[in-house]
Amino acid sequence: MNYLKLSILSASLGLSINTAFAANCEGVNEYPNWTQTNWQGVPSHATTGDKMHYNDKLYQANWWTTSVPGTTAAWQYLGACSSGERITPVQRYGKLKVCDNRVCSESGEVVQLRGMSSHGLQWYGLNKCLTEQSLDVLAEEWQADIIRLSMYVQESGYATNPEKFTEEMNKLIEMASERGLYVLVDWHQLNPGDPNYNLSFAKKFFTDVVSANKSRNNIIYDVANEPNGVTWTEVRKYADEIIPVIRAIEPESLILIGTHGWATFGASSGGSVQDILDDPVKFDNIMYTFHFYAASHKDYYRNVLDRASDVLPVFVSEWGTQNYDGDGDNDFDSAQKYIDLMEHKKISWTNWNYSDDFRSGAVWKRGTCSNGSFVDSQLKNAGVWVKDRVIENR
């Protein structure tokens, strides 16, 4: 489809084509056709300011270099080469809502979002593993719908510097939004497991972030990552406190709530789906989260997800192909059974995680983020497998 035809289609749908992420590569040398050749016996090189595109990305040389574009600090990333022919997920689906226990588009179409979760922003966030280039890769090459931004509260996270981390969250929301991605703002409370422990922090965080982004139509809020060591009743009480804070600023926001037992509907703590059915959160446009790690959580947990999604709105906001600690051998057979279930029931998901952490669950090999070379050869085994599942049937 050419650009003119797409423009007409977009106008008829009330859409605009998002090209904020695009770079103009027309007329620019493509690697390995070097800008400079045969200089003092060097067969091929670039000098300061030379531009070159490689793997559909545009780079500019910071100094004299013979390195492959994008593989060393000699190159500055300028953007993804694009003809502007991409309609983004947000343009296609608009403001999301809950209908029929699923994520639905603004027009009421059931939508299955597929994408990635960041690792902790304090370790792998802004200008580390989340950069202009890595987000272009996620949006353009992976064709993801959504990115989950994980704001740890403790563990050197938000509690250490609320202003700094709020600023970074808002900047990452802006960067993801420019690429037409949905953003899942994840309040990653984990230890202690009782979300009420961080209630005052949560109220400040969501007040600040929702206020800064209330004009956007692509934000989802997860108010409690993995409640643990507490009953569902305590989690529901927390939800009753925090949801009104968000809704007072953005009344139509889609909100996710972590379930007890590390977001397993109590499966990992002796609880059950029935706990929530007996004492549901009494707000509209909310969903409950489920997490799994395929090597640890097999048939029993899959059955819990299957049953829960029959009777409640469910979003799988974190999962991996490894053990529950995000490490160890990949169990792709077990993971595929989950993928098939989520595809069949149109359950939206984000995979853990889009970083170069040493664990097997981080999709990038160690050193990828510092080198800034987010290419397929840098993917771990899990990264190759998960990328295929994000792209599948696009």
Image: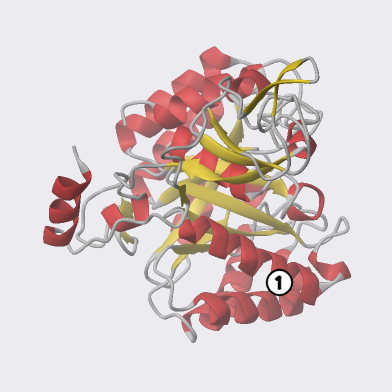
Q: Secondary structure at mark 1?
A: helix
Residue 301: x and y in percent read 55, 31
Relative placement, left or right, of 135 versus 313 is: right
Q: Amino acid at mark 1?
A: Thr
Residue drawn 67% across the image and 51% down it = 226
Seen in the picture, residue 165 relative to 186 is either above or below; the reply is below
Mark 1 surroundings: few (<14), some (14-19) or many (≥20) residues within 10 A: some
The residue indicated by pointer 1 is: 166
* Quadrant in which residue 369 is drawn: top right
Residue 104 visible in the snapshot: yes
Residue 294: x and y in percent read 60, 24
Residue 264 visible in the snapshot: no
User: Observer-nearest residue: 42 or 111?
Assistant: 42
Residue 50: x and y in percent read 64, 40
Residue drawn 60% across the image and 44% down it = 133
Q: Residue furthest bottom?
A: 248
Position of the N terminus, as image quadrant, is top left
Relative placement, left or right, of 362 versus 383 is: right
Position of the C terminus, as image quadrant, is top left
Colour pattern: secondary structure
User: Observer-nearest residue: 96 or 77?
Assistant: 77
* Quadrant in which residue 383 is drawn: top right
Residue drawn 44% across the image and 56% down it = 277
